[in-house]
Every structure is written in C-alpha cells, then in structure tokens.
Amino acid sequence: MAMSKKVQKQREQQKAATVLRGVWIVLAIAVVAISALFYLARRQNESPAASVKAASASNADTAMPAPAATAAVSSPSARAEPFGPTNLNQVSAPGVSPEGMAWIPGGEFSMGANDPPDMDDVGMKATLDARPIHRVYVDGFYMDKTDVTNAEFAKFVKATGYVTVAERKPKAEDFPDAPPENLVAGSVVFAPPDHPVPLNNYYQWWTYIPGANWRHPLGPDSNIKGKDNYPVVQIAYEDAQAYAKWAGKRLPTEAEWEFAARGGLAGKPFVWGDQFRPNGKWMANTHQGHFPDKDSGQDGYVGLAPVAKFPANPYGLYDMAGNVWQWTSDWYRPDYYRQLAAGGVARNPQGPDSANDPSEPGQPKKVQRGGSFLCTDQYCSRYIVGTRGKGEVSTGTNHLGFRCVKDVSHRPLQG
C-alpha cells in the first residue's frame, strides 16, 4: 500500500512537471509572437522607403553573415589565389586629356580580392563575393580624377533643373501600404549612437531622415555652404546617370573602376600598395576609433573629407579608397565572377544582365566600389581594392557619391 502511494505521488509529480513545461512553452511562443508583432509594427510605422533604403545603405558598410549563395563563392580552396601580371596597353593618351580627367591606358589584369594581410573575420567577409580572381581586359578610357563635387553637381542642376530622387515625394503607387503622412521626400543618414552598441543591427546607426538630400546631406538643418570641394552625396543611381549624360560621360563598369583603382599594380591589397599605413601615413579617409559611436578623426577628418586630400594613385586618381562609395554601371550578383572566370579572359565586361542579392531578393542593386569614411577593420574593410559593395538603385546616403569616365570614341550609357 505504501508502495502504491509512493508510485501515485511520483506520477502526480511527473504530471505537474509536464504541465509546467507546457506552460513555459506557451509563454515562450507568446513572447516570440509579441516580439515579432512589435517588430512588424515598428517597420510599418517607418517612412515608406526607410526599411528598404536603410538596409541598402547598410549593405555598403557591413560585414553581416553572408547567405549561403554568397558564402559558396569563398571556400578554403578559393583563398590565396594567384594574381597574374598587369599587362598595360602600350598606347599614349590620344591627345590632351579632358579637364579634370586622367588617361587610363587599359590592358589585361587580374580582378578580384585575396585575403588582406591582417586577415580577420571582417576582412574575410569583405572578400566573399570578390572570388574567384579572374583575368579581364579593358580598353583605354578617361576617368575623373576626383569624385564629382558639390560645385560640379550644382552646375548640372542649375543648367538642367534636375531634381534628385531624394528630393522627390514618394509615389503612393510605389508604397501602397504606407500612410499618406509617411510619403515625404528624404534619404538615409548615418546617425551614430552616443554609446557602444552590438554590431548586429544596423538600424542603430542608419536612419531615414525627411528632408535629407544632396543640398542637406544630414537632414534639413544641414547644408553644403563652404563645401564646394566636397564630394556630392545622397545621390541615387539615376541621379549619377543623369549627371554623366549631361557631362558627355558615363559611369564606369566595375572592371574599369578596378583597373583604374589598381593603377598598374598587380594584386596589391590597397590602392597604394601592401601596407594600410606605409611609414605610419594615412592614405585614405576611413573610420578610426570605436565603430559606430566614435570616429576619432586620426586621419585628419571626422566624417566626410574634401576631395584630393590624400595621395593620388599612380594614374593620378584621388580617393579610390575611402571617403565615399562610388556607383558603377554593373548590376550586382555574388556569383558573377564565377561566370566570368569560366569563360577565359573577359573583354570589356559590362556586368550581368540583372541583379540578384540573395540577402534581399527582388531589390535591384548596382555594384559600388571604394569604401567610405565609415570603413573600419572592426566592421567593414572594403577599402581593400577588389572588394565590392552594393546598393539599391533608388537609394542615396551621406557616404555615397560617384565619378565618371569618358571613352576615346562615344559609347552609349549602360542601363
């Protein structure tokens, strides 16, 4: 009888434990559901393009875990691939270079990026979609020595009356679920927190600000007075295209951009050579201090710098690393280099026919190059030459600009 009571007591205890576990499971599910609803509600209350544009802004300066399709581009066997020599075309510049432009002779070179000298997790992620290293040939062309400046863009706007994407009110048909009060013109701005934060949520330092545009790059209370020689920012892809067409130029292909950035140097990790700071000298405007909350400005600049304040590369091009990202005409695909490598030497590649970013399917993105003043070995090391950025075509930010190229003979603008 005593044994039966003991067994009965054990069974009651087991039943109670089972019920308790069930309660905890239900509570856990409820917490997850409430968190998801809160997140969705917050996203719905943002400005209409905020979630898309802030995410796109973050792509340029992130080291987020790569999706499977991207990670497959870089495997242990894909590292330390050999760079071949750069074979320059032995031709002189055809006459005097257009004002403000440098002659880039073209030729055959190895395109892509190996692991940086101070290899770490951030550096590895920066080179994931820059593999395999492959051979490319480009014809000679002219390239702007600097990024397009505020003064140059202002001349274009004055001559044409052009209105940038960030200055236009979003259309209701493009954002059918957005409340009318959220349909306001604006753009994405880097807004660092005042304290250290985990680096797993870029919404902590990117925000959509109504009234932000090229004239007011940080929002309506900012301006560009006295900054004629700074690179113009808050420029969407179609804005850059419109300027290039007006100037009788075009945007560079990704291959042209990398050939020009390398300056004839084969396989170097940086535009200027092998060391990030040769003899302790700062060679580009990047982020120092603790990302994202503190830029100490050890390189002389906190945030954006005027153009041409750091040494030019061997072709006479300034700021091909750091300061602002630069648009190219190529659609972004992480598997594009594998396609090129399979076909031997690619001649004047124009990029894939369409975009595909596995991390944001359906978002049309173009390749961006060069890194920005936000690049750091703590989070984004895409000042490494050969690494790639990406941006949604209607998105401008306060760390994104562009420069143009010009053919010896006219070549139509890319789409």
Image (cartoon, helix red, strand yellow):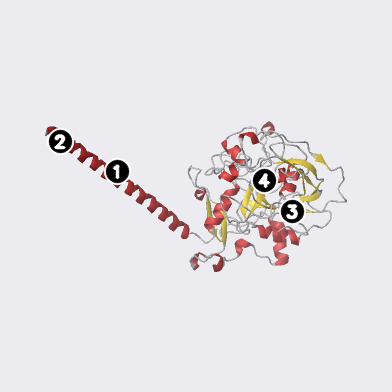
Going by the numbered disc 3, the residue's amino acid type is Cys
* 250 sits to left or right of 194: right
Residue at the spot 33% in from the left edge and 46% down from the top edge? 25
Question: If you read the primary sequence from the N terminus, does the residue marked by circle 3 or circle 4 appear first?
Answer: 4
* 293 sits to left or right of 19: right
Question: If you read the primary sequence from the N terminus, does the residue marked by circle 1 or circle 2 appear first?
Answer: 2
The image position of residue 409, as x and y in percent, is 84, 56
Observer-side mark, 2 or 3, equals 2
Going by the numbered disc 4, the residue's amino acid type is Gly
Q: Quadrant of residue 9?
A: top left
Tell me the number on the disc at residue 404. 3
Residue beneath label 4, please? 370
Locate the N terminus and report the quarter of the image it occupies.
top left
- The number of numbered badges drawn on the structure is 4
Q: Give the SS element for disc 4.
A: loop
Tell me if residue 381 can be seen: no
The image position of residue 151, as x and y in percent, is 70, 57
Question: If you read the primary sequence from the N terminus, does the residue marked by circle 4 or circle 1 appear first?
Answer: 1
Question: If you read the primary sequence from the N terminus, does the residue marked by circle 1 or circle 3 appear first?
Answer: 1
The image position of residue 333, as x and y in percent, is 64, 49
Q: Give the SS element for disc 3.
A: loop
Residue beneath label 1, please? 21
Residue beneath label 2, please? 4
Going by the numbered disc 1, the residue's amino acid type is Arg
Residue at the spot 52% in from the left edge and 66% down from the top edge? 176
Observer-side mark, 1 or 2, equals 2
Observer-side mark, 1 or 3, equals 1
